[in-house]
Amino acid sequence: MKMHRIPAHVFNLDYTLRCGQVFRWQKRGGEWMGVVKDSVISVKQKGDVLVAKSNLAAEEIVSYFRLEDDMENIYKHIGKDKLMKKVIAKYRGLRLIRQDPWECLVSYVCSRNAPIKKIKSVIFNLSKNFGNVIKSDGHIEYTFPEPDMVAEATLDKLGICGFRYGKKQAREILEIAKLVGGNNFDLERLKKYSYLDAKEELMTLRGVGHKVADCVLLFSLDKLEAFPIDVHIRRFMRREYFQDENISDDKIRELAREYFGKYAGYAQEYLFYHERSGGEK
């Protein structure tokens, strides 16, 4: 594997990997280990430098961690009030991750009403049963399976992965895999669509509602205006921006995109991590 030393200004590796947007990373000692594309990657941060050991090229690592994003400019856009500025200061350096769209889609379909431990378990089982083995420094890891590998599976074989909703969810994953693997649904082309058009397309897939679609758009398809709403964000937004009014998710999304603008998704991830971590002001 290659060793890379990559400039990483305004970046916090721990916040970025702990905030709940990705599910295949774990910290071992002072290093984070994960699987990106078909490569094991080990990363640690030393000041403003990201030290990475992987077969990936340096530019692939930069893209994955979105190290090209101008965080100071993003902070200017989303730092609309005292609370938001305080949250930014608290978690300064947290960046969104640019995930593989297929892996991201399956991960978030599996995430519905499931704790993170459960999501990680399902994704590991999918990778172990349908992906390829990668050996690295004595560790055995697995690539995330390609759509055609999943599409060829039986419901019973998929079922051993432990989906939260059993065969119902296995059918959803199988149907999506057949569409994507058969080139009947091109995830990459959605990057060229507007946010709303891309979301409409995603929501034609079984198992993809507003939250899953927004997560996929934000974390893998460069739609940084997407504002996923889960129980944490719903509670936070109602309390802090709607005076505890029982407002709809549609109204929350509308306000967020108007208020935080084209980087609403960055605001969402900072607020999500803040609320999930206890929400001290």
Image (cartoon, rainbow, N blue to C red):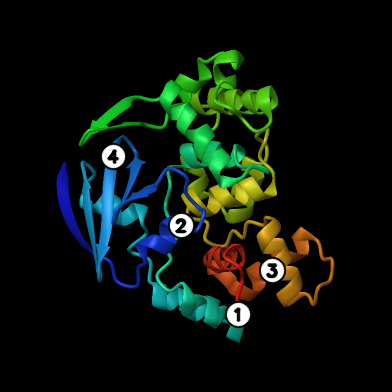
Pick the front one: 263 or 153: 153
For residue 64, say whether it is visible: yes
Residue underneath mark 4:
40
- Closer to the chain start, of discs 4 and 3, is 4
Q: Is mark 4 on a helix, strand or loop?
A: strand
The image quarter in which residue 269 lies:
bottom right
Q: Disc 4 residue type? A: Val
Mark 2 touches mark 4? (CB < 8 Å): no
Check disc 2: other Cα within 10 Å, few if <14, some if 14-19, many if 20+. Answer: some
Q: Disc 2 residue type? A: Arg
Whole-angstrom CA distance, mark 3 to mark 2, is 19 Å
Residue 126 is situated, as x and y percent measured from the top left of the image, at 48, 27
Front: mark 3 or 2: 2
Residue underneath mark 2:
18
Q: Is residue 167 above or below residue 136?
A: above
- Of all residues, the one furthest to the bottom in this rendering is 82
Whole-angstrom CA distance, mark 4 to mark 1, is 38 Å
Residue underneath mark 3:
236
Residue at point 80% right, 77% down?
243
Front: mark 3 or 1: 1
Residue at point 15% right, 45% down?
2
Residue at point 58% right, 65% down?
268
Q: Is mark 2 on a helix, strand or loop?
A: helix
- Closer to the chain start, of discs 3 and 1, is 3
Whole-angstrom CA distance, mark 3 to mark 1, is 12 Å
